[in-house]
Amino acid sequence: MSKHTEEEKSIDIGQVYTKSEKFVDSNKKPIMAAVLIIVLAVGAWFAYKAYIGGQETEAQENIWKSQYYFSVDSLDKALEGDGQYFGFEYIADNYKGTKSANLANYYIGLIYKEKGDLSIAIDYLKKADIDDEVLSTVAIGSIGDCYADLGDYDEALNYFNKAISNSDNSFTTPIYLNKAAIAYEFLSNYKKAADYYQQIVDDYPESAEAGKVKKNLAKVQQLAD
């Protein structure tokens, strides 16, 4: 490289630095404001994570008791607590954003479904954002059950099909295939009902539903012809 070229390069670099310095000087306040916003956002995120972690611990210390009451069919205590431990409703309202609150929404939805308060059940089940594949499938399918009990079979089918798509396993899938087939029967779509019953027999022959649906399958096949 010639001396002349090196000098030109040195001048170019110097000009770049000068322009950069001028840009920083003229935009110092906006740059500092942007940096401050980033720092505050990162700090807020870490503070939120720490807060949620503490909330999760508190919620877990209470939710196990509500789960126990649910398992022994003591639904009011599961919802409201027993005076020593908080119930699902308190956990859902006061520990929002935690896994325990989402799980509480799931249980509350099931309890109100059992009580026959279907609209309330649907609201809570829709809020149940659960990581567990089986529980999330049951939550979706239970919304379908509520709509079916309300006589809205189109919306019931929407959720039964979502439950079928959410998880492919030998436990929940034949259950919701069966429920979807029954809903299609109510809508007089016997061809579709037959397809769903047939899928249970073909794909899940060991399931409890497979032995139960054969009569229904024969019936809807006749009606579909």
Image: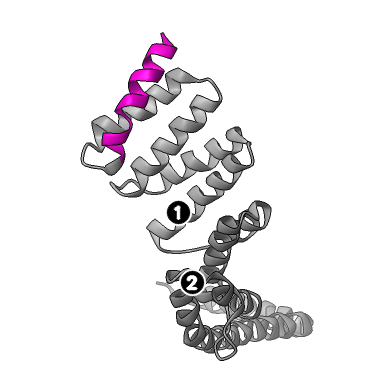
| 48 left or right, relative to 132 | right
Q: Are marks 1 and 2 in contact (CB under 8 Å)?
A: no
Q: Quadrant of the N terminus?
A: bottom left
Look at label 2 and name its amino acid: Thr
- Mark 1 or mark 2: name the one nearer the start of the chain: 2
Q: Quadrant of residue 218?
A: top left
Tell me the residue at 46%/19% (across/down). Answer: 190
Q: Nearer the viewer, residue 91 or 50?
A: 91
| 153 left or right, relative to 200 | right
Q: Is residue 48 visible?
A: yes
Image coloring type: one colour
* Residue under pointer 2: 5
In the image, residue 97 lies at what x, y percent?
A: 59, 74
Up the image or down, 223 lies above or below 70; here it is above
What's drawn in magenta, residue-wise? 209-225
CA gap, disc 1 and disc 2 = 74 Å
In the image, residue 199 lies at what x, y percent?
A: 31, 30
| 107 left or right, relative to 90 | left
Tell me the residue at 51%/75% (across/down). Answer: 100
Q: Is residue 17 magenta?
A: no
Label 2 element class: helix
In the image, residue 70 lies at what x, y percent?
A: 48, 71
- Main SS of the magenta part reads helix
Label 1 element class: helix
Q: Which mark is residue 101?
A: none
Q: Is residue 128 visible?
A: no
* Residue under pointer 1: 138
Q: Quadrant of the C terminus?
A: top left
